[in-house]
C-alpha cells in the first residue's frame, strides 16, 4: 500500500512537472513568437514606401511659342508606410506643387533640352516638397521617365518669300 501511494505520488508529481514544463515552453515560445512578430512589424514600418504621383506634361517655352514638352513620371520614396499614406491623402496638392516646381524650373532654364538633368530635377523637386511637407519624411524623388519631346514646328523658322 505504501509502495502504491509512492508510485501514485511519483506519477502525479511527474505529470505535474511535465505539464508545468510544457506550459512554460508554450509561454516562452509564444513570447518569442510575439517578439519576432513585433520586430517584423517594425521592419515593415521602417521599410521605405513609394507613392506614385503619376505622369506630368509640362510645356517648354521659347519666347511666345512652345518649344516642346517635358514628359515625366514621378514617385516619392518615404521613410515608411505611414508617411506614404499621409502623403497619399494630399496627392492632388502634392501634384500641384510638383507642377509649380516644374514651371519654376522651366522659367529658370533647368528643363531646357540642353540643360536637362534627372538628378538636378529630382533634388529640386525633393527640396520644394520638403518645404511644404516638413513633417513627412521624403527620402527621395524617384524619376521613372524624364524626356523632352521637341516641337518640330518650333525648331523650323518659316521662310519668307
Image (cartoon, rainbow, N blue to C red):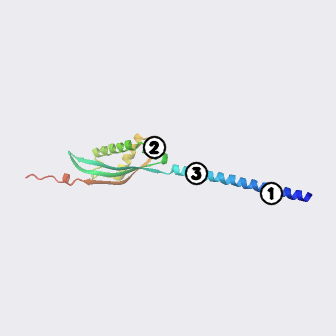
| Residue 59 relative to residue 54: left or right | left
SS assignment at label 1? helix
Residue furthest to the left in view is 161
Does 89 appear above or below 3?
Answer: above
Residue furthest to the right in view is 1
Q: Position of residue 21 (x, y in %)?
A: 74, 55
SS assignment at label 3? helix
Identify the residue under disc 1. 14
Report crowding for label 1: few under 14, some 14 to 19, many 20 or more residues within 10 A (C-alpha).
few
Identify the residue under disc 2. 86
Between tags 2 and 3, which lies in front?
2
* Residues at discs 1 and 2 in contact (Cβ within 8 Å): no
Between tags 1 and 2, which lies in front?
1
Label annotation for residue 39:
3
Per the model, the C-alpha gap separating discs 1 and 2 is 57 Å
SS assignment at label 2? helix
Amino acid at each position: 500500500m505504501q509502495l502504491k501511494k509512492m508510485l501514485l505520488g511519483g506519477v502525479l508529481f511527474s505529470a505535474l512537472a511535465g505539464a508545468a514544463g510544457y506550459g512554460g515552453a508554450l509561454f516562452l515560445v509564444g513570447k518569442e513568437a510575439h517578439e519576432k512578430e513585433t520586430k517584423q512589424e517594425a521592419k515593415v514600418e521602417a521599410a521605405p514606401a513609394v507613392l506614385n504621383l503619376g505622369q506630368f506634361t509640362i510645356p517648354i517655352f521659347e519666347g511666345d511659342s512652345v518649344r516642346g514638352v517635358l514628359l515625366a513620371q514621378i514617385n516619392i520614396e518615404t521613410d515608411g508606410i505611414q508617411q506614404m499614406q499621409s502623403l497619399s491623402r494630399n496627392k492632388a496638392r502634392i501634384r500641384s506643387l510638383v507642377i509649380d516646381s516644374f514651371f519654376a524650373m522651366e522659367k529658370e532654364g533647368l528643363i531646357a533640352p540642353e540643360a536637362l538633368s534627372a538628378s538636378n530635377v529630382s533634388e529640386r523637386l525633393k527640396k520644394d516638397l520638403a518645404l511644404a511637407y516638413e513633417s513627412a519624411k521624403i527620402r527621395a524623388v524617384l524619376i521613372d521617365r524624364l524626356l523632352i519631346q521637341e516641337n518640330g514646328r518650333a525648331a523650323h523658322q518659316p521662310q519668307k518669300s
